[in-house]
C-alpha cells in the first residue's frame, strides 16, 4: 500500500492517544488511593468511560462509521450503564440483615 494514499489518522496520533490512555490509567490509580466515599465509584467509572470512548472511537475506528452504527453502539453502552447503575444502587442501599 502506498503511504500517500492513506487517509486515516497518523501513527503520531495513535501514540498520543496511547499516552493519554496511560496517563488516565495513572489518574485511576491515584484516584483509587484517595478516600472520596461513594464518589470513588463515580470517579473510577468516569475515567473508565473516557478511556473506553477513546479506545472505541480511535482504535476501533468508530469515529469513521455511519451514524446508524454509532447510534447502535451508543444504545448498547447506555443499556450497559443502566444495568451497572442499578447494580450500584442496589448494593449501596442494601440493608444488612
Image (cartoon, rainbow, N blue to C red):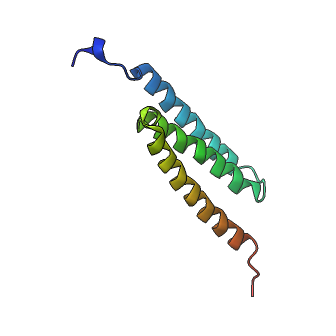
Vertical position of residue 82 compared to residue 59: above or below: below
| Left or right: 64 as drawn, with respect to 77 | left
Q: Which residue is most to the front? A: 68
Q: Which residue is most to the left? A: 1
Vertical position of residue 76 compared to residue 67: above or below: below
Quadrant in which the N terminus is drawn: top left
Residue at the spot 69% in from the left edge and 73% down from the top edge: 90
Residue 37, position in %: x, y?
Answer: 78, 58
Residue at the spot 56% in from the left edge and 59% down from the top edge: 79
Residue 74, position in %: x, y?
Answer: 53, 48
- Quarter residue 94 falls in: bottom right
Residue 69, position in %: x, y?
Answer: 44, 44
| Left or right: 82 as drawn, with respect to 57 | right
Vertical position of residue 28 compared to residue 91: above or below: above
- Camera-nearest residue between 83 and 67: 67
- Camera-nearest residue between 28 and 76: 76
Q: Which residue is most to the bottom? A: 97
- Quarter residue 4 falls in: top left
Quadrant in which the C terminus is drawn: bottom right
| Left or right: 82 as drawn, with respect to 75 | right
Residue at the spot 53% in from the left edge and 36% down from the top edge: 21
Residue 86, position in %: x, y?
Answer: 66, 67
- Camera-nearest residue between 61 and 88: 61
| Left or right: 3 as drawn, with respect to 34 | left
Residue at the spot 64% in from the left edge and 69% down from the top edge: 87
In this rendering, the count of numbered labels is 0
- Camera-nearest residue between 11 and 67: 67
Amino acid at each position: 500500500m502506498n503511504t500517500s494514499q492513506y487517509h486515516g489518522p497518523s501513527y503520531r496520533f495513535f501514540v498520543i492517544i496511547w499516552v493519554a490512555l496511560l496517563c488516565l490509567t495513572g489518574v485511576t490509580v491515584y484516584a483509587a488511593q484517595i478516600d472520596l466515599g461513594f464518589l470513588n465509584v463515580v470517579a473510577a467509572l468516569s475515567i473508565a468511560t473516557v478511556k473506553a470512548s477513546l479506545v472505541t472511537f480511535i482504535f476501533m475506528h468508530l469515529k469513521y462509521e455511519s451514524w446508524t452504527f454509532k447510534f447502535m453502539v451508543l444504545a448498547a453502552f447506555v443499556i450497559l450503564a443502566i444495568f451497572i447503575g442499578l447494580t450500584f444502587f442496589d448494593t449501596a442501599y442494601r440493608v444488612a440483615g
